[in-house]
Image (cartoon, helix red, strand yellow):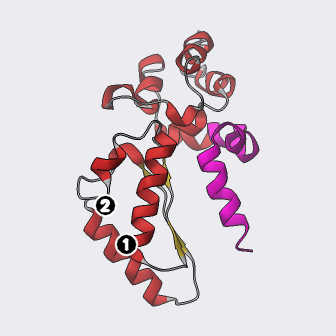
Amino acid sequence: MTTYARARSDVLQWLRQDTGAHVTTFFDLYALPTDFPRRAAATGAPSGAARATLLEEAFARDIGSPLFFPHIQPHEFEALLFSDVAAIDRALQLLMPVSRLSNLTTMLTSLPTPEDLNDSPSTAPSKRLLGLYPAYDKRLFGPLIAAEIGLTRMRQACPHFGAWLTRLESLS
C-alpha cells in the first residue's frame, strides 16, 4: 500500500462495484503508510494486536460500510509462521543443514504471541528468518511452511489472525 488515500479509494470502489459483497484487507501493521488514520495514536498501544485493532476500527469508521471489515496483521505474514517454529526449522533445513530451532524458540520466549514478534525494521519476522537462514525466500518458503503448519495451529497461536478467520467463516 503506497498511501492510505489510495487504499481507501480502492476499498470504496470495490464496495460500489458489488453492493452485496464483503470487503476485507490483509495489511502488514509495520508497513502501513504514515497517512493511515490514528497511526500516531496506535503507537502507544501495548501490543501489536492492540495497535492493529485500533487501526482497523479507525479504517472501518472511515469507510463506514457494514460490508467492510479490515484486517491488519501484526506484524507481517511471517509472524504467523512462528506459530510453529519446528515447522520453520524443518522446511528451512533444506537451505541450511544445521538446525536453528533453539534460536527460533528463544525469539518467542518473552512474547505472549508470535504476532508480537517485531520491534524494528531489522528485526521483523522475515528479517529474523533471513538472519538464521540467509537463502530464505518468503515467496517460495512462506507458503510451503504455512501449508505445513495449517490454519488451526496459526489461529491458536495468533489470536488476532484467528479472530479475523472466524469473522470470514461467519459470512458463509
In which quarter of the view is residue 75 placed?
A: top left
Label 2 Cα crowd, 10 Å radius (few <14 / some 14-19 / many 20+) = some
Q: Which residues are magenta?
A: 145-172
Location of mark 1 (residue) = 62
Q: Are marks 1 and 2 in contact (CB under 8 Å)?
A: yes
Question: Predominant secondary structure in magenta?
Answer: helix
Location of mark 2 (residue) = 37
For the point 38% across and 28% down, the residue is 119
Residue type (three-letter) at the residue carrying disc 1: Asp
For the point 54% across and 37% down, the residue is 115
- Cα separation, mark 1 vs mark 2, equals 8 Å
Label 1 Cα crowd, 10 Å radius (few <14 / some 14-19 / many 20+) = few
Q: Quadrant of the C terminus?
A: bottom right
| 163 in relation to 127, above or below | below
For the point 36% across and 43% down, the residue is 30
Q: Quadrant of the N terminus?
A: bottom left
